[in-house]
Structure formats: C-alpha cells, structure tokens
Image: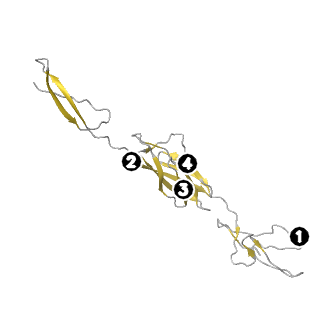
Amino acid sequence: MSLGLRVDRVIETVTPQEFAYSTPDREAGTPLATAATVLNTSEVGNRAPFIDEPGTNTNYKPETGHYKLTTDEDKPVSGRVKASDPDGDALTYAKGSDPAHGTVTVNTDGTWTYTPAKDYNGSDSFTVTVSDGKGGTTTATIDIGINPVNDPPKIDDPGNPNLDPNTGHYKLTTDEDKPVSGQVKASDPDGDALTYAKGSDPAHGTVTVNADGT
C-alpha cells in the first residue's frame, strides 16, 4: 500500500510549518504510520503602493499620472497626494524633488503647499514619493501652472542722494523764487515700458512732469 498526500491551494500567506499526518491501515483498520514533513512557503513579495485618486479629483490626470494645478503669480497653492497599498501597509509621503521656480513643503500625510518664486510666471513641477516602509515606493508628479499678474512699477534709483530709501521719497532744496529740476526713475518687474505723469499739484507752486520722469 502506498501513502498519498494532497495539499490544496494555499489561500492565505503562511510561514514555514512542520505538520504531521497519519493514514490508517485499510486492511486492519488501525493507524499504519505517522509521517512528518515541512511545508516550505514564502511570504508573498511586497507590492508597491500606487496613486489612488477618485474620479472627483479634477486635479489628477489619469492619462498622464500627473496632478495638474494652477495659481497666480506670487500666490501659494496647496493640494494632497493620495495613494493606496495592495498589502495594506501604512504609507508615508515625502518630497521627492524640488521645483525649479519655487519652494514646496510636503507633509507625511501627503498634503503639500507650493510657493512660486517672486514675480515668476510660467510652469513648474515637483514630485512626492510615497513609501510603504518595506521598500515599496511610487512617485507622484505635480505640475503647476503660474498665471502672470501685472506688477506695479517701483521707484528704482540707486545711488541718487536725493532719494531716501527708507521712505521712498525724493528730497531736494532750492532758494526762494528759484526753480529746481530732477528726475524720477522706476523699473517694472514685468519689463513693461513706463511713462511718467503728474500725480498731484504742489500746494505752493507749479510743476511740469515729462513722460520720461523729468
């Protein structure tokens, strides 16, 4: 008589085990033998997390796997990366790469805040790395579009002794009944051409302002 052993498909993950089984003597009706064996099994390989966003999140583009958001120049924008783990592992989030034209703070729960560089407009991006703590990672890319905003010109007249940098005021003196001249100089963060005009009249005299600031 030969002994046979059938092992059904293992549904759950198990660790190496030793088990015993016995088979009866079919002729005598008594146990014939007890055998022991080791069932060698290995844990299923760790699976990496994946970005898991519901269809209601319009900032996530499944066709590219990227998040895409917009903001205005000089205005921070915030969001959150969401992921799932096939093995149910707890996930942590961290900054993967820095943006080229701003700064970003990434929290361990996947929330982040991006701040564009001053006066910058255009496109930028950064990445967030999701980790399951067991070597499995995935990376989310966040693309940011920064809309241009018109910036006002500013007085920019370095080295002019008549300009007080603390107040932004020009200060000149002259004698009674004697005209005095000068020039206002400014720059524009957007590179726009500037024109100059009289904003208000003096209380005790007259002034002529030319388009070039004189």
Q: Quick one: label 3 or label 4, which is nearer the N terminus?
A: 4
Image spot of residue 203 (x, y percent): 88, 70
Q: What crowding class fits label 2: few (fewer than 14 Cα within 10 Å), some (14-19), or many (20 or more)?
A: some
Residue type marked 2: Gly
Q: Quick one: label 2 or label 3, which is nearer the N terminus?
A: 3
Residue type marked 1: Ala
Image spot of residue 206 (x, y percent): 87, 73
Q: Secondary structure at mark 1?
A: loop
Q: Which residue is mark 3?
A: 104
Q: Which residue is mark 1?
A: 203
Q: Secondary structure at mark 4?
A: strand
Q: What crowding class fits label 3: few (fewer than 14 Cα within 10 Å), some (14-19), or many (20 or more)?
A: many
Q: Which residue is mark 2?
A: 136
Q: Is residue 214 left or right of residue 108?
A: right
Q: Quick one: label 2 or label 4, which is nearer the N terminus?
A: 4
Image spot of residue 137 (x, y percent): 41, 49
Quadrant that contains the N terminus: top left
Quadrant that contains the C terminus: bottom right
Q: Marks 3 and 1: CB-CB under 8 Å?
A: no
Q: Which residue is mark 4?
A: 79
